[in-house]
Amino acid sequence: MPKVKKFKIEAEIVHGECPTCYELTMLVGLSNDVYRCMNCGSDLHQHVNGKISYLPIMPAREDGGKPFVKEWK
């Protein structure tokens, strides 16, 4: 009988303000520095530079143009 390998998945859950929807919400860690907002579903990149801040991940545009960034708080 083959051995069944068990593994445990642990997700880091933090509370923070999402810069996309401006809500204080739970952010679930997808990797060491990528989080997902549980309110709007946007993917955020964690930056630590004296304070922890979360910035949206901007995918490259298909037409080769520069992405438009709206004003954040």
Image (cartoon, rainbow, N blue to C red):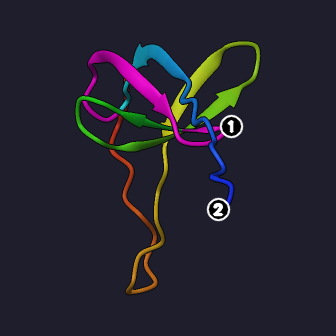
Identify which residue is drawn at 26% across, 18% down.
23
Identify which residue is drawn at 29% across, 41% down.
41
Looking at the image, is mark 1 or mark 2 nearer the viewer? 2
Quarter of the C terminus within the rendering: top left
Residue of label 2:
1
Task: Out of 51 and 42, give the one closest to the viewer.
Answer: 42
Quarter of the N terminus within the rendering: bottom right
Task: Out of 13 and 19, give the one closest to the viewer.
Answer: 13
Identify which residue is drawn at 66% across, 62% down.
2
Residue 59 is situated, as x and y percent measured from the top left of the image, at 46, 65
Q: Is residue 1 above or below residue 63?
A: above
Q: Is residue 55 above or below residue 51?
A: below
Crowd band around label 1 with a 10 angstrom C-alpha radius: few (<14), some (14–19), many (20+): few
Residue 44 is situated, as x and y percent measured from the top left of the image, at 48, 40
Instruction: Kindly identify the amino acid type of the residue bearing the numbered disc 1.
Output: Asn
Looking at this view, name the residue that lies furthest to the front: 1
Magenta range is 20-34
Q: Earlier in the sequence, mark 1 or mark 2?
A: 2
Residue 72 is situated, as x and y percent measured from the top left of the image, at 37, 31
Left or right of residue 29, residue 18 in this image: left
Residue 20 is situated, as x and y percent measured from the top left of the image, at 31, 35
The residues tagged by marks 1 and 2 sit, at their Cα atoms, a distance apart of 37 Å
Instruction: Kindly identify the amino acid type of the residue bearing the numbered disc 2.
Output: Met
Quarter where residue 34 is shown: top right
Q: Is residue 67 above or below residue 40?
A: below
Residue of label 1:
32
Identify which residue is drawn at 61% across, 35% down.
8
Q: Is residue 21 magenta?
A: yes
SS assignment at label 2: loop
Crowd band around label 2 with a 10 angstrom C-alpha radius: few (<14), some (14–19), many (20+): few
